[in-house]
Image (cartoon, rainbow, N blue to C red):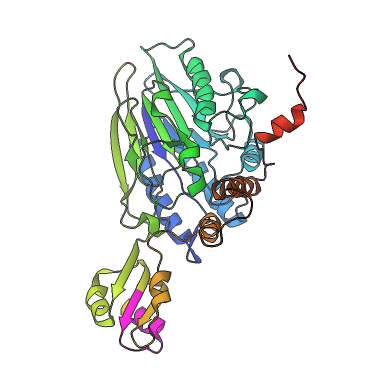
Amino acid sequence: MRLLHVSDWHLGRTTYNTSRAEDHDTVIAEILGYARVHRPDLIIHTGDLFDVVRPAYQDMARGIDALQELAVVAPVVVLCGNHDSPALFELFSQLIGPDSPIHFASRARAADQGGVLTFPTAAGEEIRLAPLPFVHANRMLDGFEEPGTWSARYADRIHLVEQALTRGLLDGFDNRRHVAIFAAHLYVGGAVLSGSERRVQVGDNYATQLEHLPAVTYAAFGHIHKPQDLPGSVVTGCYAGSPIQLDFGELDEAKRIVLVDARPGYPPEIQSLPLSGGRPLWRFEGTMGELATAASGVGRALALATIYSPSTIADLHSRVQDLLPDAVVLDVYPVAADRQLEVAVAAVPPGPEPGIEELFRDYLAEQGTKGAAADRVMATFSRLLEAIETEQEAYFPEEGFISAGPQSPS
């Protein structure tokens, strides 16, 4: 059995208002080239095909065209990530029909309702795949949960799903000809973050436990953008990571996709296939003279620059761009000694661009709250924001106590 594992394309992404479409086109061509050379039996995309739940037409076309080209090589399974829309994935499934080699896993399903997929291989083996798309904390899982589980810890709720999928994978399993694969868009506690992930959905509230994963031949994971093996030694698997450096939280990360070869009853052989098509990100801090010295190695990067000078430099952005003719200069931060622009120094972000959650957290740290604990206000804000982004109604465990009404004495 040969498996190609890709993830977290985030089609439609912009970095400092600069479109990454050019980088995606280049890196998708690389991925297609690998698929045609290595001829896998199955291709798994472990989520975040798009960057937003309502992608532009051009981004939908780019994604579907790429999946169709991959499907010429082998069947393709695409998991719904936290940036994707389950409703859009279900629409895609309806449009392409049940006989398409592309399978959109829009939500977690029980094993007897399509939650375990099977694929024959050229060698006469069978791949048994249990996909687990991203599960939002404010959404109940039909077929897995009862209302009483809504207030349970996220990891415990996910464990219920993992247990059910494990039973489905093992039902009728023959280790002489079956290969078991688990694919998920989840944050496993202990995984190393890039810094560009949506922080509310990779924090402690969204952490799942490694020991709860099914005992499979290979576990294909998405959600974390830094390519890496799963932590620990309980299950063999990988985060494929994002195929390009999406923002400065991924600075200097080497990108890849994963090729897995496995035989029934044997451990897999895992190979990283490097990706180099996306333009790298580059950050500079120093004087114009130091920039001139460093400029020769920059090439076609997306660049941020902080320029120190004794006095204000006229047309600074243009002068920086002249020194970096092949690069896209995203922004330039001037730090002129005679102006004492200390705020400008602080404005240079050390990692990814701040999101609305980070900005609101900073606001609470500065202004405080009235009548409620700050962490509770922050948690409520994050849950409401997530509900808006996913076009779902927000649910709070306290609502269950309200709807239950007063309890009669026993």
- Which of the 4 image quarters holds residue 298? bottom left
Task: Evaluate whether residue 48 shows in this view.
Answer: no
Locate residue 188 relative to residue 56 in the image: left or right.
left
Residue stretch rendered in magenta on the structure: 306-322
**Viewer-nearest residue: 410 or 28:** 410
Tell me: residue 259, above or below residue 299: above
Is the N terminus in the top left, top right, bottom left or bottom right quadrant? top left
Q: Is residue 388 left or right of residue 128?
A: right
Q: Which residue: 25% across, 79% down? A: 292
Percent coordinates x, y for residue 316 in the rendering: 39, 84
Q: Is residue 30 left or right of residue 167?
A: left
Q: Of residues 383 and 246, which is closer to you in this image?
A: 383
Residue at position x 39%, y 44% in the image: 241
Q: Residue most toward the left?
A: 293
Whole-percent x, y for residue 383 in the image: 60, 45
**Viewer-proximal residue among 124 and 7:** 7
